Amino acid sequence: MKRRTLLTAAGLTGLTSACSSGIKQSDSTASTGTLKLGYVTPQTGALAPFGEADTFVVGAVRDWFAKNPLRVGDRDVKVEILVKDAQSDSRRAGTVAGDLILSDKVDLMLVSSTPDITNPVADQCEANGVPCISTVAPWQPWFLGRGGAIGGKSFSWTYHFFWGLEDVEAVYQDMWAAAGAGKRAGGLFPNDPDGNAWGDAKTGFPPEVAKNGYSIIDPGRFAVGTQDYSAQIARFKAGGAQILLGVVVPPDFTNFWKQAAQQGYRPRIATIAKALLFPSTIEALGDLGQNLGTEVWWSPTHPFTSSLTGQSAAALAQAFTTATGKQWTQPIGFVHALFEVAAKAVTTAGATNNRQGIVDALKSLKLDTVVGPVDWTSGPVPNVAKTPLVGGQWRKGTTYPYDLVVVSNPLKTAVPVAGKVQPL
């Protein structure tokens, strides 16, 4: 949805005046005794696996700040974190962001997990002159999807860190070639911000992979929550698509993949974003989960350390497992990194409620985090910092039903591979 349409749907169109007039609320150079951080995340609904680790990460960060007060300017300040569940709904994401801004008076907004959630929250912050840091959405649907233009329009209050489509395109093609999967891919792209960005004929996967001789069979956009995928499966089978490519929510891929098995469609390799990031999705597939591939943004083997707690990626993942009894999951690192970046921006600004100072700090911020270096001075566009990406496949494990094994690292050789690409 376009920005004004979304704000209208949330009942908050009047907030756009803050952006157009340059109004800043509660902007000061004097720090208060408390830093109020808003955090919006999908903890329920179809995107709930993205928020599965939130309770652990936010709780651990709260404990850390309770024992290690944040030094801002010449005083120690308390850190208050206000969490809102977006319920996997864009309208609600915008609404709860408005509540955090107008009712709770947060100093800085944090938001994670897919353009469905990051974009409406960022739009509310842009409209109200509130600093916002977002992550876990490729930068193109976040930047271009909100009206940004390469070489043109950017944003004043909203900053994002994650990888881009160019990175996942490179990683996936490396995996396709290693699997000997031919040159025809079936595109499973839903009618949502991710699906529209990935399947875009001008800026998405099709033109980029065509440079290396790949073609994508695209049956068209389908509604999130679709139950019958017979039409897509028939097109992929008829077109000889030995590669399956897509970016779908977990329930939708589970339905698709079980129907594909029933209807005799089995490509040589599958590289699916979003759905295959999480152990829970793979476990639900049983034997059908073996060797399914996805991108890997963070893992215990990533050679990075938290600037906040000093924990390595491995130590942070283990802390999650020890506390919850669950297998590590990729969002752990990026949710933690949100608080690393927030702390650095506020301490650099020198005041908790100096909103202009916080965004000025973000413009030039460089920080080594548990997900890797975050550097807003290096682009690829204003307001965006990129993080590294590798590729992985799910293999049957010992401690857990499946383990995510890194098999492709052309863009970040410092992340070790633990196996080779295997066909389905």
Image (spheres, helix red, strand yellow):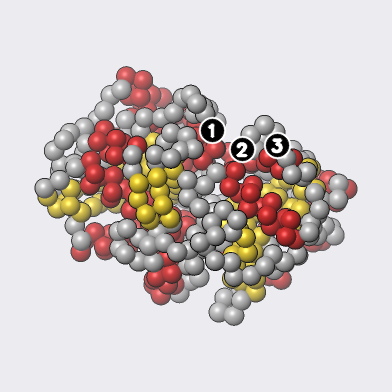
Pick whichever of labels 2 and 1 is earlier in the sequence.
1
Distance from Cα at disc 3 to Cα at disc 1: 18 Å
Q: Residues within 10 Å of mark 1 (few under 14, many from 20)?
A: some
Horizontal and vertical percent for residue 74?
11, 48
- Is tag 2's residue or tag 3's residue first in the polypeptide sequence? 2
Q: Nearer the viewer, residue 106 or 183?
A: 183
Front residue of 51/172: it is 172
For the residues bearing labels 3 and 1, Cβ distance under 8 angstroms: no
Give the numbered dot on residue 207.
Answer: 3
Alpha carbons under labels 2 and 3: distance apart = 12 Å
Query: Sequence-wise, which precedes: disc 3 or disc 1?
Result: 1
- Spot occupied by residue 9 in the image (x, y as percentages of width and height): 48, 30
Please indicate whether residue 262 sits to the left or right of residue 37 in the image.
right
Residue drawn at (49%, 67%) of the image: 301
Q: Secondary structure at mark 3?
A: helix
Residue 397 appears in the picture as rendered: yes
Q: Quadrant of residue 196?
A: top right
Residue 26, x across and y down, in percent: 21, 33
Residue at 17% in and 33% down: 28
In three-dimensional space, the C-alpha distance between marks 2 and 1, rounded to whole angstroms, equals: 8 Å
**Residue 184 in the figure: left or right of residue 389:** right
Against 351, residue 318 (above or below) is: below
Which residue is the site of mark 2? 197
Say which quarter of the image contains residue 215.
Answer: top right
Check the image and name the residue furthest to the top: 21
Residue that mark 1 sits on = 145
Q: Quadrant where the N terminus lies?
A: top right
